[in-house]
Image: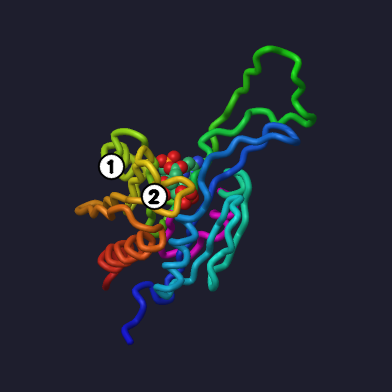
Amino acid sequence: ASTPVLAGKKVVITAGPTREDLDPVRYITNHSSGKMGYAIAEAAVAAGANVELISGPVALTPPAGCAIHRAVSAAQMHQQVMQNIADADIFIATAAVADYRPKHLAAQKIKKNNDELTLTFVKNPDILKDVANLTNAPFTVGFAAESENVETYARNKLASKKLAMIAANDISAQGLGFNSDRNALHVIWNGGDKKLPAASKTVLAEALIKLIAEQYNKNNSP
Ligand code: PMT
């Protein structure tokens, strides 16, 4: 049998949503189910990688053979990634991380006293950007969930965040993307791109891992 394409490589993957608390009973989150990230983790294990899966709150069972690290907020996910990124060969950021969190976490339940409620948010750390900017950064793959100008925004993120590769995810398409079993991706890297048409997240994850391994091995061959 041939050697698996990512044999012995350390691959760190983020998956799922983050949850940003407002008060003891309420939080802000998004529709990410973790299915895409967990499928990528499974495909990476099948390709021979040592996988560290950093997961937001989801209702999925982690794939066999990967190490699981749980996070709830973006700050916790950032911390978990930074604690596990040393010596990583590849980083894949599939998680839908909240860009902002409430400025104040109310110690007590917010009361229904006024007709309007105004909340102030502050920016969360950008996990993908921080990993890509590390000295000896791993081969870093971002996702771009966009509802318009998908390819342009994805190419901008590839360049501005200094990524090796980006998977553009058109979230305007019905039945694909967030919380669905299917997705479609446009994968872009410096010097090439490939459209992976609508398919199950399992099939897409295998195709994405194959593309990542090809580009990683091209960049890192002696
Ligand atoms: O979980 P599923 O239900 O299966 O859905 C899959 C998915 C639609 C969530 C997934 O395919 C996807 O597109 N993930 C990226 C979602 C996202 O938040 O995209 P973004 O364009 O806002 O972020 C760009 C990139 O930066 C992403 O790689 C994200 O993980 C990363 N990021 C963003 C903000 C932040 N603070 N830290 C980050 O690392």
Query: Of residues 131 and 44, which is closer to you in this image?
Result: 44
Residue named by callout 2: 142
Q: Secondary structure at mark 2?
A: strand
Residue named by callout 1: 155
Label 2 CA crowd tier, 10 Å (few <14, some 14–19, many 20+) = many
Q: Are marks 1 and 2 in contact (CB under 8 Å)?
A: no
Q: Secondary structure at mark 1?
A: helix
Q: Please state which amino acid type lies under the numbered disc 2.
A: Gly
Label 1 CA crowd tier, 10 Å (few <14, some 14–19, many 20+) = many
Left or right: where does residue 148 sit relative to residue 29?
Answer: left
Tell whether circle 2 marks a residue whose Cβ is less than 8 angstroms from ligand 1: yes
- Point out the residue furthest to the top here: 115
Quarter of the image with the C terminus in it: bottom left
Rendered position, 213 above or below 60: below
Rendered position, 187 above or below 216: above
Left or right: where does residue 183 sit relative to residue 218?
Answer: right
Range drawn in magenta: 78-92
The answer to whether residue 11 of the structure is visible from this angle is yes
- Per the rendering, the mark at residue 40 is none
Question: Horizontal and vertical percent for residue 191?
Answer: 20, 53
Question: Horizontal and vertical percent for residue 65?
Answer: 54, 73
Left or right: where does residue 89 sit relative to residue 74?
Answer: left
Left or right: where does residue 58 sit relative to residue 14?
Answer: right
